Amino acid sequence: MTQHVPAALPDRIRHYIDGAFVDSVDGDTFDVLDPVSNETYVQAAAGKQADIDLAVAAAKRAFDEGPWPRLLPRERSRIMHRVADAVEAQDARLAELESFDTGLPITQALGQAKRAAENFRFFADLIVAQHDDTYKVPGRQLNYVNRKPIGVAGLITPWNTPFMLESWKLAPALATGNTVVLKPAEFTPLSASLWADIFRDAGVPDGVFNLVNGLGEDAGDALVKHPDVPLISFTGESSTGQLIFANAAPFLKGLSMELGGKSPAVVFADADLDDALDATVFGVFSLNGERCTAGSRILVERSVYDDFVERYAERARNIVVGHPNDPATEVGALVHPEHYEKVMGYVEIGKTEGRLVAGGGRPEGFPTGNYVAPTVFADVPPTARIFQEEIFGPVVAITPFDSDEEALALANDTKYGLAAYIWTNDLKRAHTFSQNVQAGMVWLNSNNVRDLRTPFGGVKASGLGHEGGYRSIDFYTDQQAVHITLNQAHSPRFGTGVPLQAAH
């Protein structure tokens, strides 16, 4: 099957500021590659400080003077539902563009487009149903929480499943009445450019949504350091998160950061091994392994270890690697040659650290493009780099354990703490292990099935703060406590000459 190039690709990708598509102030651009040919298919505007300044100014005007923050929740909700309708109506086109731009298999890209629509529907409903706390002191005082949008939210998104992850930030930021400046990842700017028309057609006022493309060290850095951007939501590498943390500190900005992961999948001997096999194969090889919550360390109880490794390796060897647009493809091309080189470097490191039982190089029949055969290393010690470091590709490390205590020690033995997957039919063990594992999210006898009402985020080097459900509402609003006295205020009467005890 030959590479599929979508029809009607743009001749260039521009910024979107204050309701208009614009080039960079200095006219600079950068190349955008497709991951199958690694050839430039379009030029994108390269944003810098001047472009961020224009976008933030537009967003601030729209927040200070425009109608968006002042709309009733139901009015914003209607617009949000129109956005979801538009995304659903063009989900096949979105998936086609996303697959071409990122290398994701087309069937998985279609799922991400549907999830993007659902993110908007979820927050459209939540802001209408939202309730705030009230605290009564009978006969004396009534206290309540008044939520207010904060201002301009800076949203910095990654290159894996970009359109869906953009929706994950855009939906709650806009639903709560903020205005936004979005800086998408430079590797994958194609689908982000579709938001402009979607929002405009849905009735979002000019200036509420602004988009600036560019490199992280230019556009992203300028957005983080801008004094008129009080909120930054970032998804990406932990090292970049540390830099953002430092650069945002002088401004005391609100930060929400979902960072890297090296998540364990722990398989006990009493688990349903067929289900565990299905979930752990999917959990690391779906989305080309380019997912923060991938269960990329599989810890298996010794008594079933050899059988599990043999069956796992067989499944990995039979995974269909193919062109991203082929519906039969299960693993496509990695996003960019830079990332391909990083992943292949870890594959070579792994050959010195563990026992290679599947993959280990390019798949047959793909001499070019960013293709990596699904790769499985067994007998990996916890000191190995492929055990400790995030690879972000179709590479997995399998390690045996002999006891619950050893399994927990191995699960917690990395700097990361995003997700964990536990496979056991022992109810006591399941809950005890889950509550002691160092992870922001745990799935018991399940792969990564998200409930949008629950908090999403990690501990340790995997993140700062949570989004999802009411946690997103918390992040994107100021919570103002209002106190009302219902009878005489009992204040000590300073300056009256009356003794305090008597005054009280």
Image (spheres, rainbow, N blue to C red):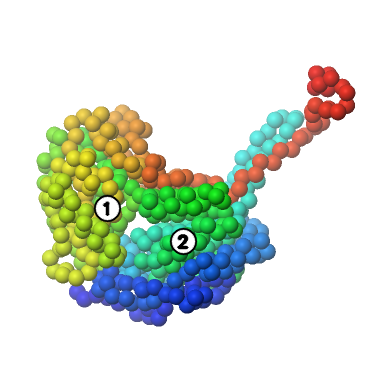
Q: In the displayed structure, does residue 496 sit left or right of residue 319?
A: right
Q: In which quadrant will I find the C terminus?
A: top right
Q: Position of residue 330 (x, y in %)?
A: 23, 61
> Which residue does the image show at 25% across and 36% down from the upper left?
410
Q: Which mark is residue 401?
A: none
Amino acid at circle 2? Gly
Task: Return the mark for residue 220.
Answer: 2
Q: Residue 431 location, x and y as percent?
A: 34, 32
| The image quarter in which residue 274 lies | top left
Question: Percent position (x, y) of residue 152?
Answer: 57, 58
Which residue is depicted at the point 21% across and 43% down? 384
> Depth-wise, is mark 1 or mark 2 nearer the camera?
2
Can residue 267 be seen here? The reply is yes
Image quadrant holding the N terminus, namely bottom left
Judge by depth and name the residue closer to the eye, 172 or 119.
172
From the viewer's perspective, tell me whether residue 259 is left or right of residue 409: right
Residue that sits furthest to the right in the current view: 497
Note whether 498 is above or below 71 in the view shown.
above
- In the rendered image, residue 193, in percent from the top left (x then y), is placed at 45, 71
- Give neighbour class at mark 1: few <14, some 14-19, many 20+ (Cα, 10 Å): many
Say what secondary structure mark 2 lies in. helix
